[in-house]
């Protein structure tokens, strides 16, 4: 899915992969997907692929946004708070030191999806 997020030629894939990630985020506990995505962001998982880190950075935003979709008024994000804290730590430790235009674009997109 990380590689598919980097896909720009196929408009169907470009449209459906983010929606798929949001559905995964909505219905799968963040404790299940969080560690895998965070390891990829930190380049600890499949770092030999060029699309892993940038794709995981984008994927986190969609997954996290999906995990918040079923919140009812008055509920907090405590079920996903650890993943958000770990995401910020991974960005601070790994991404910020090596940021370029492409990674900055992915980070902004991810944050934009999370805020929406």
Image: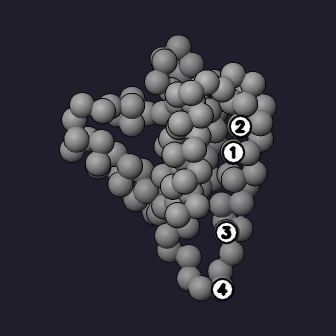
Q: Pointers 1 and 2 in contact (CB under 8 A)?
A: yes
Which is more toward the observer, 5 or 1? 5
- Residue at the front extreme? 101
Image: 65 above or below 107:
below
Q: Which residue is mark 1?
A: 87
Q: Which residue is mark 3?
A: 77
Which badge, 1 or 4, comes first in the chain's sequence? 4
Identify which residue is drawn at 59% across, 34% down: 104
Q: What is the number of the mark on residue 74? A: 4
Which badge, 1 or 3, comes first in the chain's sequence? 3
Which is more toward the observer, 67 or 94? 94
Q: CA distance from mark 1 to mark 2?
A: 6 Å
Left or right relative to 10: residue 17: right
- Residue at the top extreme? 48
The quarter of the picture where residue 7 lies is top left
x and y, in percent, of residue 112 in the image: 54, 54
Identify which residue is drawn at 39% across, 31% down: 6
Name the secondary structure under disc 4: loop
Which of the two marks, 2 or 4, is nearer to us in this view? 2
Which badge, 2 or 4, comes first in the chain's sequence? 4
- The answer to whether any part of residue 97 appears in the image is yes
Q: What is the number of the mark on residue 91? A: 2
Q: CA distance from mark 3 to mark 4?
A: 10 Å
x and y, in percent, of residue 27 in the image: 46, 63
Q: Pointers 2 and 4 in contact (CB under 8 A)?
A: no
Image: 25 above or below 38:
below
Name the secondary structure under disc 1: helix
């Amino acid at each position: 899915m990380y590689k598919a997020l980097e896909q720009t030629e196929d408009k169907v894939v470009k449209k459906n992969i983010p929606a798929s990630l949001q559905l995964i985020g909505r219905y799968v506990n963040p404790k299940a997907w969080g560690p895998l995505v965070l390891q990829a962001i930190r380049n600890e998982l499949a770092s030999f692929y060029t699309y892993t880190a940038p794709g995981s950075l984008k994927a986190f935003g969609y997954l996290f946004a999906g995990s918040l979709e079923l919140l009812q008024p008055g509920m907090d994000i405590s079920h996903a708070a650890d993943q958000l804290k770990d995401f910020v730590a991974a960005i601070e430790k790994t991404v910020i030191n090596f940021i370029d235009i492409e990674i900055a674009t992915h980070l902004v997109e991810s944050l934009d999806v999370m805020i929406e």
